[in-house]
Image (spheres, helix red, strand yellow):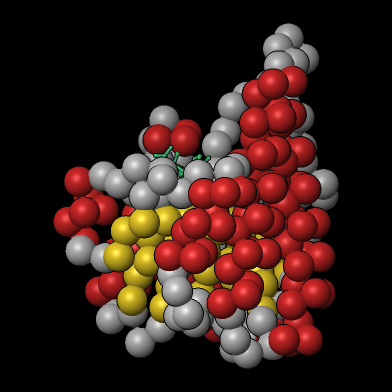
């Protein structure tokens, strides 16, 4: 039975991750800004008021965990707003950088103090942050923030490897959640299953790599 920390587990992909880990008998620690009826129904360990952009709140969360070992951390929280050539809103872009880039960096940095050899970190990034894969343009803040979190994760993987902690950047697919107005073709439970398979099967030898939930590696 492993201790699994998931950020943004009140809805969407994070909620489905929590469900699957709980069903298989792991100890789920859900870090959320605000819980939901669906999350409460899971009867997992819920920590509220954890805003990943707020250093004091993340530090309090880390302290509240006490001296447990975090076996798996999944940085799932994220936001999407769309900026394009007709609407370059730099405040919205800055906000995405705070949540999508600095959030996972902050949470991983602090919680790594509770990790041990064999612990694993997943960062739910997006292939929208891939340079090679960008054929569409637009979505300035989201693309930039996800490209930047890929670098944050790669960097963390190098710094955590000597301690035997592995880190993976993961793309969940185009998933039917509130973020995309439930438009994606992939149900969140299918995405969550794939993400967990990646977390289970990827090893420290593959640390710092970027994967689709469906099981193939993605280009930076
Ligand atoms: N859906 C897709 O097609 C897709 C594709 C590629 C990547 N992703 C990524 O997958 C991850 C999960 O997204 P989703 O599709 O499940 O979207 P979602 O349903 O909108 O869920 C987003 C989650 O992030 C949380 N969050 C937002 N701001 C936060 C903050 N400041 N501090 C802590 N938590 C915060 C939300 O909590 P609140 O309820 O408190 O707002 C919510 O739990 C994100 O990183 C997203 O970028 C999704």
**Direction left: furthest residue:** 41
Q: Position of residue 132 (x, y in %)?
A: 82, 49
For the N terminus, the quadrant is: bottom left
Can residue 172 be seen from the camera position used here?
Answer: no
Quadrant for residue 109, please give it: bottom right
Give the vertical position of 88 relative to 126 (above or below). above
Can residue 4 be seen from the camera position used here?
Answer: yes
The residue at the point 64 percent across, 85 percent down is 203
Q: Position of residue 18 (x, y in %)?
A: 34, 63
**Direction top: furthest residue:** 86
Give the vertical position of 203 relative to 49 (above or below). below
Q: Position of residue 102 (x, y in %)?
A: 69, 47
Nearer to me, 178 or 214: 178
Nearer to me, 53 or 76: 53
Q: Where is residue 138 in the image (x, y as percent from the top left)?
A: 72, 26
Nearer to me, 66 or 98: 66
For the C terminus, the quadrant is: bottom right
The answer to whether 174 appears left or right of 98 in the picture is left
Give the vertical position of 127 relative to 17 (above or below). above
The residue at the point 52 percent across, 69 percent down is 73
The residue at the point 44 percent across, 69 percent down is 65
The answer to whether 76 appears left or right of 123 in the picture is left
Give the vertical position of 206 relative to 111 (above or below). below
The residue at the point 69 percent across, 47 percent down is 101
What is the tally of numbered marks visible in this picture? 0
């Amino acid at each position: 039975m492993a201790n699994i920390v998931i950020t943004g587990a009140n809805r969407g992909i994070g909620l489905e991750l929590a469900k699957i880990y709980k069903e298989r008998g792991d100890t789920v620690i859900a870090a959320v800004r605000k819980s939901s009826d669906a999350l409460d129904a899971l009867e997992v360990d819920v920590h509220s008021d954890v805003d990943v952009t707020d250093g004091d709140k993340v530090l309090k969360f880390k302290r509240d965990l006490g001296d447990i070992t975090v076996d798996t951390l999944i940085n799932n929280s994220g936001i999407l707003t769309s900026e394009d050539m007709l609407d370059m809103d730099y405040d919205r872009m800055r906000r995405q950088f705070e949540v999508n880039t600095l959030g996972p960096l902050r949470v991983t940095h602090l919680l790594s103090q509770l990790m041990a050899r064999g612990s694993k970190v997943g960062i739910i990034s997006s292939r929208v942050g891939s340079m090679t894969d960008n054929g569409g343009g637009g979505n300035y803040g989201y693309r930039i923030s996800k490209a930047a979190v890929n670098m944050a994760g790669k960097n963390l993987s190098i710094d955590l490897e000597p301690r035997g902690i592995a880190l993976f950047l993961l793309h969940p697919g185009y998933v039917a959640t509130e973020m995309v107005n439930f438009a994606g073709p992939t149900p969140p439970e299918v995405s969550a299953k794939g993400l967990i398979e990646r977390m289970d099967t990827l090893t420290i030898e593959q640390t710092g790599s970027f994967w689709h939930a469906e099981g193939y590696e993605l280009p930076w």
